[in-house]
């Protein structure tokens, strides 16, 4: 008898919990940039995005990265093997130049 009551109570609590999670999911809005960009005390950032364009010149490479906004990634060496449309993770130092976010990359990880 007690087992049946315990089973019914557990089942009712589970269903109520799932319903609460379902309705809460519709109320919560997660901003993509807040999830992907994280900064430490040294100004280091880590973000993920899709390569839009690559501009290579002598001694440096500029990558236009599509994120929640367009971000320029500066790499002070010539790189190869990264192409437009590829998803990459960038770790580097963030700065603003002319009101636009720029990242000087320390590390690039391809997916």
Image (cartoon, rainbow, N blue to C red):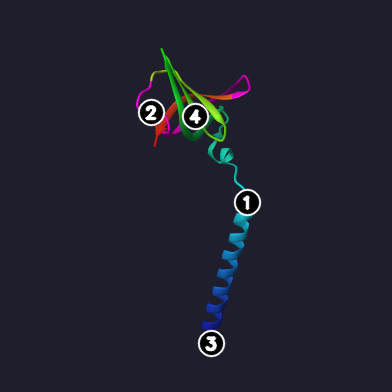
Q: Earlier in the sequence, mark 1 or mark 2?
A: 1
Q: Describe the element under mark 3 as helix, strand or loop.
A: loop
Determine which residue is flagged by label 2.
82
Q: Earlier in the sequence, mark 4 or mark 1?
A: 1
The percent position of residue 95, horizontal first and vertical second, equals: 58, 23
Q: Tag 2, which secondary structure?
A: loop
SS assignment at label 4: strand
Label 4 packing within 10 angstroms: few (<14), some (14-19), many (20+) = many
Magenta-tinted stretch: 79-100
Vertical comparison of 105 with 26: above or below: above
Q: For the residues marked 4 and 1, what is the alpha-carbon distance in whole angstroms?
A: 27 Å
Residue depicted at x 57% and y 76%: 9
Tell me the CA gap for discs 2 and 4: 12 Å
Direction from residue 32 to residue 107 in the image, left or right: left
Question: Residue 87: x, y in percent?
Answer: 43, 35
Residue 51 position in % (x across, y down): 45, 30
Q: Dot 4 corresponds to which residue?
A: 65
Q: Earlier in the sequence, mark 4 or mark 3?
A: 3
Is disc 3 surrounded by few (<14), some (14 to 19) or many (20+) residues within 10 Å?
A: few
Residue that badge 1 annotates: 28
Instruction: Check residue 50 in the rendering and tell me which mark sits there, or answer none.
Output: none
Q: In the rendered view, tell whether residue 85 sits above or below residue 80.
A: below
Disc 1 packing (10 Å; few <14; some 14–19; many ≥20): few
Residue that appears at 58% across and 71% down? 13
Q: Which residue is mark 3?
A: 1
Instruction: Give the image quarter of residue 24.
Output: bottom right
């Amino acid at each position: 008898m007690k087992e049946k009551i315990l089973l019914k109570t557990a089942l009712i609590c589970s269903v109520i919990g799932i319903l609460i999670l379902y309705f809460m999911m519709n109320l919560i809005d997660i901003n993509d940039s807040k999830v992907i960009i994280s900064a430490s005390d040294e100004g280091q950032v880590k973000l993920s995005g899709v390569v839009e364009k690559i501009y290579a010149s002598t001694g440096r490479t500029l990558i236009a990265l599509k994120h929640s906004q367009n971000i320029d990634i500066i790499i002070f060496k010539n790189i190869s093997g990264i192409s437009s449309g590829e998803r990459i993770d960038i770790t580097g130092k963030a700065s603003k130049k002319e009101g636009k976010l720029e990242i000087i990359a320390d590390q690039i990880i391809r997916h």
